[in-house]
Image: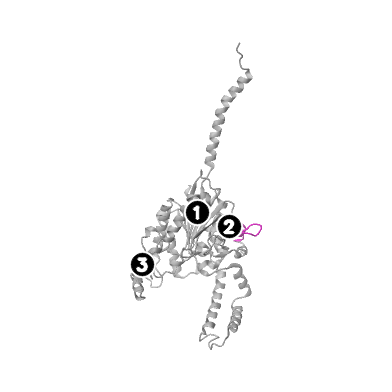
Amino acid sequence: MTRLPSPTIQNKTLTMKLLLPLLAFIALFSSHSLAAEKKPLKVFILAGQSNMEGHARIETFDYIGDDPATAPLLKMMRGADGKPTVAEGAWISYLTGRYDGSANGEGTGKLTAGFGARGDKPTEDGGKIGPEFTFGLTMDAALKEPVLIIKTAWGGRSLNTEFRPPSAGPYEFSEARIAQMQKQGKDIAAEKAAKAKETGRFYRYMVEHVKKVLADPKRVCPAYDPAAGYEIAGFVWFQGFNDLVDGNTYPTGADGKTRDYTRYGVWMADFIRDVRKDLGAPKMPFVIGVLGVGGLKANDGTVAFQKAMAAPSLLPEFKGNVTAVPTAPFWAEELAAIEEKRGKIRAMAATLKNKSKNGPNKDGTMTDAQQKEYLKKYEAEVISPEEAAKWTRGASNAGYHYLGCAKTFAVMGKAFAEANLEMLKAQKH
């Protein structure tokens, strides 16, 4: 006699037959959901010359807190222990070196302060910040995905030569420059060869380094998930001073006073197109940090240069994906006024040393000790104790480096990030 399964066993068997497909469906659905939740690593590239390196010393952080408008920014930049913030979800790879590109090296790690200018010690904390610090902190706060910053910057580099993009073609000396070199007895062929060797060299360093990092993102960013991949989500360009002062490349314009910087704008547009092509990111948001040295009171030449820098952002082809961010509003006017007085003291020191005819030491009888004492009294007359204290608290470098003011670099880094985020947001709609 065949024993039939009990009703209980039959029910359990039926239940399992129905449940197994359901469990399989749930597992499949869950795996798809998890895959959908995985978002690519957000990669941002920062490039330029000395002000992208950043010469603001960490010791000037306190000055940020003196202004109620920027005090909240300082809280983001510093922890409760008083030390610079270490980002939770942002990492950085920083290629830099000497101004001539020798001794290039890479600094890596979680984003924090110290990834500013490093000179000939590229792998070591330089005690300074550039725009990268608050740029990265702002991105880390705004995005759910991990953030990777790839920064490449060297001091004293121009767009017309070292960062010259491929589409701009070879650098061509003007007839006036060739005539000048001939007058100086220079070997024209040798000068052209030297220029050709430098042309585009730092552009290539930049692209090669970005590709190297993205070939293995996990080497720099442990949070990188290969299954999710990465997205080049933005590029910030902050440069300009060497082009601003280059009278050999940018001739005097029709007014006979101001240089014609039109070609900078043309080459900047070439740069944007080329870097997007070379990195395979055709719609990558691009931020142009417009040079703001001198602030809102800049001379006509600087204003003309600023217009040329921003020009690509007005081209129809770049509408919505290229933004120019002026940095002149971030210039520390109050510190610049003190620096102007410091300039008077330096001028007086030179007057004493050179025994200028109209100076206090015109007869050359003042000893070194007497000159020192004279300068001390002169400084006390020119700069008040309050101004001296403010300078020490807020500045740490020269005017062409935005006075090495951390407040300036912090505000501009945040502004660059916000402009980039706006473009990313617009691309989603």
Say whether disc 3 or disc 2 marks the residue closer to the N-terminus.
Answer: 2
Residue 389 on image: x %, y %: 62, 71
Q: How is the image coloured?
A: one colour
Say whether disc 1 or disc 3 marks the residue closer to the N-terminus.
Answer: 1
Which kind of residue does numbered mark 2 sit on?
Thr
Which kind of residue does numbered mark 1 sit on?
Phe
Say whether disc 2 or disc 1 marks the residue closer to the N-terminus.
Answer: 1
Q: Which mark is residue 112?
A: 2
The residue at 63%/72% (across/down) is: 386
Which kind of residue does numbered mark 3 sit on?
Lys
Residue 191 on image: x %, y %: 37, 69
Residue 117 appearing in the image: no
Residue 257 on image: x %, y %: 40, 73
Q: Determine whether label 2 and label 1 are within 8 Å by CB.
A: no
Q: Which mark is residue 44?
A: 1
Rendered image quadrant of residue 322? bottom left
From the image, tell me which residue sits under label 3. Answer: 192
Q: Secondary structure at mark 1?
A: strand
User: What is the crowding at mark 3: few (fewer than 14 residues within 10 Å), some, or many (at least 20)?
Assistant: some
Q: Is residue 375 found left or right of 306 in the rendered image?
A: right
Residue 380 appearing in the image: yes
Q: Secondary structure at mark 3?
A: helix
Rendered image quadrant of residue 73? bottom right
Q: Above or below — where is 152 with respect to 35?
A: below
Q: Is residue 231 found left or right of 165 in the rendered image?
A: right
Residue 124 on image: x %, y %: 56, 61
Q: Whole-Å distance between the Cαs marked 2 and 1?
A: 16 Å
Q: Secondary structure at mark 2?
A: loop
